[in-house]
Image (cartoon, rainbow, N blue to C red):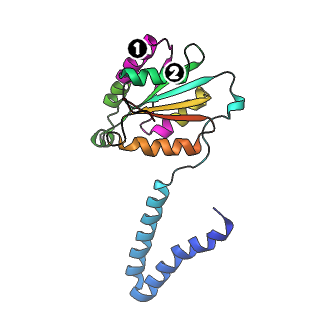
Amino acid sequence: MSPWKLPFVVAAIVVPIVLAFVAGGPAFGVAVGALVAVALVVFAARQRPRDAIGPSEEGIGGRRVLVVVTEPLEDPETIERVATAVGRGAAAVMVLSPARIGFLDRWASDVEGARRHAQQRLVISLASLAAAGIEAEAAVGDEDVVQAVDDQLGSFPASEVILVSAAEEDDEGAAEAARELQERLRTGFRWMVSGPAAR
């Protein structure tokens, strides 16, 4: 945060509380203070880091590709596009499948079903790539696509990241994840929509 913004932030916190104490007494002041505190916590919780993700391409030895799949690689045209982008035999390849956790599963802390679905996506995707001549390793990642990529790049520094997802109307988080990865990745990035229409 810029130093000149700090006084404005402090004033935005303090002034409503002081005015509430003056206008409505201690009970009203405490209530407004509690509301301001909740607003601060919600605002802080919604903030995401905007730092660059991954190593710079110069620091990576050889061509390494991280393929992120939010649905199985089954469509022949998509498999061919991914295989062409990776380049047969030209790269170390890691396929990453985020464990997409449902709302109720998150509240119940039940992540096993999401991990199982992610592993199934990996098995299908690895078999499809192997049939196309691409050997790859596999990993299950965080439910948040951007966080999963960030985590994986710590152990698998990639020179390029390819996100393969369903169309935007079928995977509403894909477009947002693609935009954020495009902005934050230090390495090359491609977004491919599964099916005949390429991106």
Q: Viewer-proximal residue, 109 or 192?
A: 192
Identify the image quadrant of residue 64: top right
Kind of residue at disc 2:
Thr
Left or right: 65, with 38 as reference point: right
- Tell me the tag on residue 84: 2
The question of residue 131 being in magenta is answered with: yes
- Name the residue at the left extreme: 104
Q: Is residue 189 above or below residue 11?
A: above
Left or right: 198, with 4 as reference point: left
Q: Quadrant of the N terminus?
A: bottom right
> Tag 1, which secondary structure?
helix
- The residue where tag 1 is placed is 127
> Tag 2, which secondary structure?
helix
Residue 118: % across, % down: 37, 27
* Residue plotted at (59% across, 18% down): 91
Residue 160: % across, % down: 58, 30
Q: Viewer-proximal residue, 179 or 151?
A: 179
Crowding near the residue tagged with mark 1, few <14, some 14–19, many ≥20 C-alpha atoms within 10 Å: some
In this picture, which residue range is highlighted in magenta?
119-148
Spatial CA distance of label 2 from label 1 is 16 Å
Kind of residue at disc 1:
Ala
Which dot, 2 or 1, sits closer to the camera? 2
Left or right: 167, with 179 as reference point: left
- Name the residue at the front extreme: 197
* Residue plotted at (59% across, 74% down): 8
Residue 18: % across, % down: 49, 82
- Name the residue at the bottom extreme: 23
Identify the image quadrant of residue 89: top right
The question of residue 120 being in magenta is answered with: yes
* Residue plotted at (40% across, 32% down): 70
